[in-house]
Amino acid sequence: MPASQLQDDFHYPPHALRLGARELLLTGGLFVLFGFLAPGLWTGRELFEPAADYRVPYELSNDYWLYERHLREASKDETAVLLIGDSVIWGEYVTREGTLSHFLNEEAAGNQHFVNAGLNGLFPLALEGLVEDFTHPVRRRKVILHANLLWMTSAESDLSSTKEQVFNHQPLIPQFSPPIPCYRAPFEKRISNLANRNVSLFAFSKHLQNAYFDQLSIPDWTMERAHAWQAPARHLLAGHLPEEPHEDPDRGETSSRHKSWSDGTRSPQSFPWVSPDESLQLAAFKRLTTLLLHRDNELLIIVGPLNEHMIAEGSLSAYRKLRSELVNWLQERGILHYLPRVLPSEHYGDASHPLTHGYRQLAHEIYPLPTFQKWLE
């Protein structure tokens, strides 16, 4: 057989699969169809019945798809009031029965349903991204938004430092604009983060990784020694959505972490507060507030209370200037807000997180306020 004929006969390797335009369109259509159907089908199969004090479990803090599902379920209740914020709302040192939302529910005695829509490890720049892309059910709702000025205590906390940093919830921060000086992710990683936030199938895939595959991709999960002989599909179908432990060794009044900052081991600190005009976190919080208002939500801002007992005397004036700047901004726009009184020193676990008794006192102070009651009507 002539060599030229052999070359013609074997122009393509015999194992190669070549798709024409029609096949490519069909494949793309099937992928899109799967992307639309898979999350909904899985929602019908995955048992998710959040209790009254439900919060996204600590181990699923990066599961933004589950967070949105939590809000979608909560929004079915017309009396629901959503508390949005970082770990102060979520409850860093307390069980879910020791949070602000829990004690507000106690005060309400069934007249309202206060929902813990906090997420551990957040900060304003990440919270802005979370609300923008994963809180679509939050429209025309009553929303309590917590302002935690702890994120302006230094350039590092504010993420305005030029030194590269590793921090929580990187996929939620602005990937390109405004620029974050300490965020040095490569271009392809930033694009991937945006895709995971804006394509429901990708967010759903991340949910499966977080909830069922130890936050690993399926190929990486199968490479773990403990899973070497397990079929991923069988493991997924047999799995259950993780929940908070009934007895959390890291949280609650029996936990070694649930103790006052003023137990004799720590003293007041000096903080190099960021200027209000230069703070990336403060600017993000203002954009977030505007976004929630544009969605026709009835908004109430709770500013603090930060643990002023832990702030050294020389740092208090800078903190109060920063707080005044935010309060003036809210007043100029007619946004309802409230500054709770500073709690007793022993009711704080650190610079911003109350302990169980602190949350109880906050709820007892806030709920009976005439302005709060009028807002709830």
Image (spheres, grey):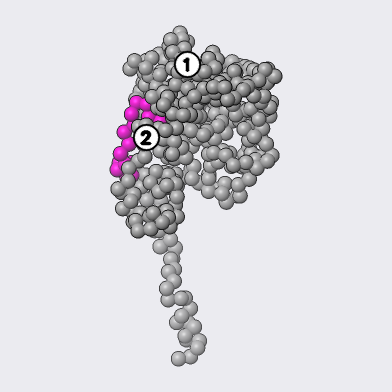
Q: Are marks 2 and 1 in contact (CB under 8 Å)?
A: no
Looking at the picture, tell me which residue is in the foreground, 260 or 195: 260
Classify residue 28 by image quadrant. Answer: bottom left
Residue 146 coordinates in the image, percent (x, y): 51, 23
Classify residue 80 by image quadrant. Answer: top left
Report if residue 124 lies within the magenta region: no
Residue 329 coordinates in the image, percent (x, y): 61, 19
On the question of residue 302 being in view, the answer is no
Residue drawn at x 52%, y 24% is 349
Q: Earlier in the sequence, mark 2 or mark 1?
A: 2
What range of the chain is rendered magenta? Answer: 41-56
Residue drawn at x 39%, y 22% is 102
Report if residue 44 lies within the magenta region: yes
* Residue that carries the numbered disc 2 in the rendered image: 245
| Depicted 252 relative to depicted 305: above or below | below
On the question of residue 357 being in view, the answer is yes
Classify residue 152 by image quadrant. Answer: top right
Furthest toward the front, the residue is 264
Residue 336 coordinates in the image, percent (x, y): 52, 16
For residue 267, the mark is: none
**Quadrant location of the C terminus?**
top left
Looking at the picture, tell me which residue is in the foreground, 331 or 311: 311
- Give the residue type at disc 1: Leu
Please state if 268 lies on the left or on the right of 369 as rendered. Answer: right
Residue drawn at x 62%, y 41% is 165
| Depicted 367 relative to depicted 211: above or below | above
Q: CA distance from mark 2 to mark 1?
A: 26 Å
Q: Residues within 10 Å of mark 2 (few under 14, many from 20)?
A: few
* Residue that carries the numbered disc 1 in the rendered image: 362
